[in-house]
Image (cartoon, grey):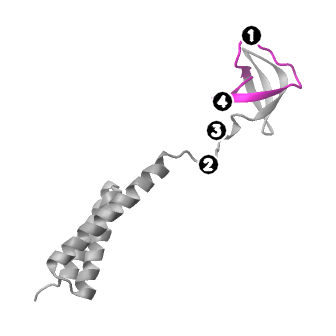
Amino acid sequence: MEIDAWVWWLVGATGLGIALVITAMPELGMLALGAVAASVVAGIFGGDAVFQVVVFAVVSTALIAVVRPIANRHRAQRPQLATGVEALKGRQAVVLERVDGSGGRIKLAGEVWSARSLDAGRTFEAGQEVDVVDIEGATAIVM
């Protein structure tokens, strides 16, 4: 009993899929899709072995050439929605207790935070508005 070529391509695609899961290398997924395309050519169109290999190579190369740069571009972008302390940087706060280089209290985003002045010689009195420039631990750095 002879096994059809399309089955071998699917076995290869499955092996590449397993390797993708183990190694998390997206290129292996693209090679697996190339093997699926070669399986389709072998099973539906009955192409010869050379044509199947050419389809595998062309589809795999095209996927790597197109998808990989797009994925790298998305990975390099910062998230557009800032969360946590990153969302607090740049916001305004109201001084509750005098803030200087050694400490104080502010109301930031509805919560009371400890704060200190970015410039050690600068002092902010209660009621003044300040800008949060950084967060260090649980202390807002203001100016």
Q: Is residue 60 above or below residue 93?
A: below
Residue 140 is a magenta residue: yes
Q: Position of residue 124 (x, y in %)?
A: 82, 19
- How far apart, in angstroms, are the residues tagged by discs 1 and 3? 26 Å
Q: Is residue 142 above or below residue 37?
A: above
Query: Quadrant of residue 44 in the image?
Result: bottom left
- Residue 107: in sight, yes or no? yes
Residue corresponding to mark 3: 86
- Tell me the mark number nearer the camera, choosing from 4 and 2: 2
- How far apart, in angstroms, are the residues tagged by discs 4 and 2? 19 Å
Residue corresponding to mark 2: 80
Q: Earlier in the sequence, mark 3 or mark 2?
A: 2
- How far apart, in angstroms, are the residues tagged by discs 3 and 2? 11 Å
Q: 141 left or right of 4? A: right
Which residue appears at 30% of the width and 61% of the height? 28
What element does badge 4 sit on?
A: strand
Numbered range of the magenta stretch: 116-143
Q: Amino acid at mark 3?
A: Glu
Q: Is residue 88 above or below residue 59?
A: above
Q: Position of residue 122 (x, y in %)?
A: 77, 13
